Amino acid sequence: MTTVFGDTKKRAEMVLEFLSLYGRHDIPAAAGHEKALIERAHSAGPEPIQYPVLKNRTGLLSDRPAEDLIIQCVREHPDLVILAMGSMTNLAMAFLREPELMRHVKILAMGGAFFDAKPEWNIACDPEAARLVMEQSENLIMMGLDVTKYLRISPEMIDGWRKRKDPAMDYFLEGVSLFQKATGFPVTFHDVLLVAYLLDPETVSLQRGDYTVELSGSMTRGTLVSLSNYYEIHSPEEGRLQFAVHVDTNRFFQILEQYF
């Protein structure tokens, strides 16, 4: 696992501690790139919002660059699937290092908005990296904010999880509480859709298309832009990447209840 953007070392420490709660001391984590390829488009603050939940700073924190760990894992496990749940800086660096190796790897990424002309956080944090990955990958599936935004977690669900008295769940919920207090955002499982799709691909309806990332606009930098010619009729099967057009929310929450 690699962390990206902001204080990545502290993010990696949090990853290791969360893994340890499940007894997974065998999974290494690498602190990835703190800044975007070209510029620091946003500031993530001095440390992650949830960092105060950290109790023990131990684990297999790799001192290797994140892209090295990614490349090593791809070489050792050619059939692996990369889940990209943040900005794509680490991935972009891996593509720059080993373009032929990386272009065939299956990547599931949460980011962008395919039906709303607005920048989304994961893409906006490093638009150049996202553009590089989107243009070079031959096996990319993206779940945009315009689909994942429907996966809100109700207060009743959170209350039910809290009643479990499970250390790992308590740790998670403490982080959720800190996040809500700091941002005011509703609890929405954007990134979890990637895992749900792996468990049950029928959870998401996909379509093919050709998109890039706008880099120059003062208000549109980081926005996804369709490269399709609107005067031509395109089949939903045409296009370099696949993106989510619909999520079966009932199916998603059934998966969540079964595995979470």
Image: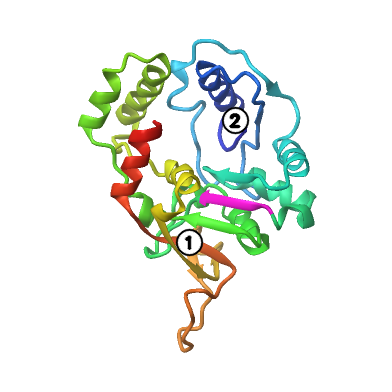
Q: What residue type is labelled 1?
A: Phe
Q: Position of residue 143 (x, y in %)?
A: 46, 54
User: Residue 8: which disc?
Assistant: 2
Quadrant in which the C terminus is drawn: top left
User: Tag 1, which secondary structure?
Assistant: strand
Which SS class for mark 2?
A: helix
Q: Where is residue 60 in the image (x, y as percent from the top left)?
A: 67, 20
Up/down of 68 relative to 29, above or below: below
Q: Residues within 10 Å of mark 1 (few under 14, many from 20)?
A: many
- Which residue does the image show at 62% across and 40% down from the upper left? 35
What residue does disc 1 label? Answer: 243
- The residue shown at (22%, 31%) is 155
On the image, the x and y values in percent for residue 15 come to: 55, 25
Q: Give the range drawn in magenta.
A: 105-109
- Check the image and report above or below for 82 versus 212: above
Q: In this view, does 85 lie to the left or right of 76?
A: left
